[in-house]
Image (cartoon, helix red, strand yellow):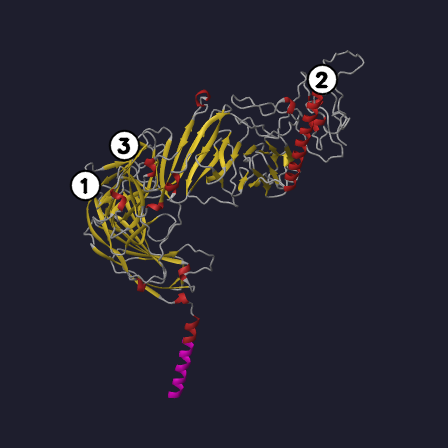
Amino acid sequence: MAGLDFGVTIALLWVLLLGAARLPHGAEAAEIALPQGCGIIVLIKLGTPTLPVKPCYIVISKRHVTMLSIKPGERVVFTFSCESPENHFVIEIQKNIDCMAGPCPFGEVQLQPSTSVLPALNRTFIWDVKTRKSIGLELQFSIPRLRQIGPGESCPDGVTHSISGRIDATVVRIGTFCSNGTVSRIKVQEGVKMALHLPWFHSRNVSGFSIANHSSIKRLCIIESVFEGEGSATLMSANYPEGFPEDELMTWQFVVPAHLRASVSFLNFNVSNCEKKEEQVEYYIPGSTTNPEVFRLEDKQPGNMAGNFNLSLQGCDQDAQNPGILRLQFQVLVQHPQNESNKTYVVDLSNERAMSLTIEPRPVKQSRKFVPGCFVCLESRTCSTNLTLTPGSKHKITFLCDDLTRLWMNVEKTISCMDHRYCHRKSYPLWVPSNILQLPVQLHDFSWKLLVPKDRLSLALVPAQKLQQHTHERGCSTSFSYLVASAVPGQDLYFGSFCPGGSIEQIQVKQNISVTFRTFTPTFQKEISQQGLNVSYIPYFKEEGIFTVTPDTKSKVYLRTPNWDRGLPSLTSVSWNISVPSDQVACLTFVKERTGVVCQTGRAFMIIQEQRARAEEIFTLEEDVLPKPSFHQHSFWVNISNCSPVSGKQLDLLFWVTLAPRTMDLTVIIIAVVAGGALLLFGLGLIICFVKKKKKKINKGPAVGIYNGNINTQLPKQLKKFQKGRKDNDSHVYAVIDDTMVYGHLLQGSNGSFLQPEVDTYRPFQGPMGDCPPSPPHICSRAPTAKLTTDESPPCFPPESENEPYTFSHPSNGDVPSGNTDIPLLDTQEPVEPAE
């Protein structure tokens, strides 16, 4: 029997073990018992599932329910019908404490019931403590203290503290907090509602706070923030981001070690519509003789404060119809005082009318580590991360910053001259004032906006030293450069970036521009003393820009069209006036064979013209191949005139110029010497013969003149090498003829003048230059372009005897044209026949 009993026992144990193995994880029984009069209510209810899951129930006395409430004096045993109830249910433990009916339970607050007897669910402990309206209840938090978080933020460990107060029957949310912060105490009027949320896997068994005392309070709440060393804290007004309660007062008390400095920055705020009083912030600062110091929310807030201080937010009586929202989010930064904290710098803008200076942080990558603040303080107290100084007064500034290289400054100045009679030939230096350079912050940009009377005057930029244009082939390596761009509204035209050490002597622009002096290293102040830039108001011209270039004999000069990355703007003309010394020859080279531009309307041209010989070449950039490297013994023009290109087929050209000594071939020298000697001998022979004949005539006596009417007294004309006149040969025929040229007579108006089309391919240059850039053929007439009409500029064309009409070069057919070249090609009334 004993053996049988033993076998039965073993079998029963196996059955129990197998049965236990098949029970779901959540089916383990849980028991919660609440003592009578404890004031605790436990509620188990469905949470918000993150994913669709199978239904789960609370099993109690074989009943399946979705919510269970346990009150004081009750004992309940229950299980769950699923394996993972934490995915379905949450548990709330609420304790009500009435300090008006009896004494308040001062001291550390315990977690009751203990988390060890509760099921493994996400749990929230709630303490609702009520006091009289004029009494404030103070909660004190042990280390680690609390850190306030904003909407949408979460705590790393999942443990959050939500604190609310009351205004009569209205609940006011003070804020949500995580661990590891600076908030040490919170005092709330008319009681407090504290909620501690613990995730189901967290084993915390302490609340982390205590009820310190309750005493009189005359504001919504007081929050104490304690700094042990350097650090920062971000805090928000009650009910943030919703509106702060109407006509309420909230205070933050900051405890700061005496050897540290604190600064306040408003990160985000809104003001409401006030009927009475005004919304403001008040500071109580140690040592201040004007406590409280009152600021508007729009003002720069105090900084560089030593010791403890208070900050209060005061609301107003709001408009009942349109109350608006008052809210505030701010940051307090505590750090060691810096070396610059006790130095005051004076920036004198009292004589400036159109200049502003901004000091701001450099763009840097954000770091998760604590980074000391970098503030600029006006009059040593109003501090902020950026500061703008306006013209018309002197400004005293100090810096509260651990590393001033984290800041830079940008300056803008407008130079405007709108009376063309007064501005003509006026000159202004573009230089950085010394009182700006003496600041311990690097200058990043100094921009001059230069304004001219429209269609009356243009601008000329003349550097003290010649400039180099920045290109990928030869970039600027200096510590600063000048950026030149159009300042005409709606015009996107960037002329380029230029630095000292090049070949550009002058840049002329047609309309308003901005010139930006940009620095790259702090050593620019050593180089800027040798560099200057003057701007002059000059007679108006129609090209967008003219560059005067004198190449260096030792290096290439790289030049490129404006708007390099986006292409030259439509219907824009730009010229380069390239000087060639008398003992040098210039080689002009283009980087690519074709431009790739595709014109939607109009045509794109390039003209290369030597200024002395007036010899020119015209290229249609849309069709022609760019010229091979060409040599020029005289100064010459390069003119580029754009059409209206198709999107994606923009015009951009890069070319370079080099100089080489002018040399002469030995054969030419020998021939010249021999020819010179022969000419000398021939001249001597003529002199000898003339002397002998004269002696003979003297010996014969005086000669008697007899008239012979049959003799022709005129010298015989030299037979022309080619008998055909200009009208008989093909020298006036274009290789490419526009329709408007062929049928030009159809465009004549009633008065006999030619009608101009609305879209032009070129805007002729009319600048005040001694030598004018070339102009391509007019679209409706082959007659020469009109002369310049400036006061001091000579005509763009040579005297009439040398005037040559513009023609396109075309292959020769063996005939050499001759005849009168002074006749304009369209002076005749006969229609021009199209070329075959």
Q: In this view, does 191 lie to the left or right of 828?
A: left
Say whether disc 2 or disc 3 marks the residue closer to the N-terminus. Answer: 3
Q: What separation in Å lies between label 2 and label 3 (alpha carbons)? A: 131 Å
**Chain-order first, disc 1 or disc 2:** 1
Badge 1: how crowded within 10 Å, few (<14), some, or many (20+)? few
Q: Which of 303 and 122 is in front in this view?
A: 303
Dot 1 falls on a residue whose secondary structure is loop
Q: In this view, does 410 lie above or below 113?
A: above
Is 448 covered by the magenta stretch? no
Q: Is the magenta stretch mostly helix, strand or loop?
A: helix
What element does badge 2 sit on? helix
Which residue, given by chain and number where applicable, does mark 1 sit on? 287
Mark positioned earlier in the residue sequence (1 or 3): 3
Q: Mark 2 points at which residue?
A: 699
- Compute the Cα span from label 1 to label 2: 129 Å
Look at the image and give the residue range highlighted in magenta. Answer: 1-16
- Name the kind of residue labelled 1 in the image: Gly
Q: Is 152 placed above or below 739 here?
A: below
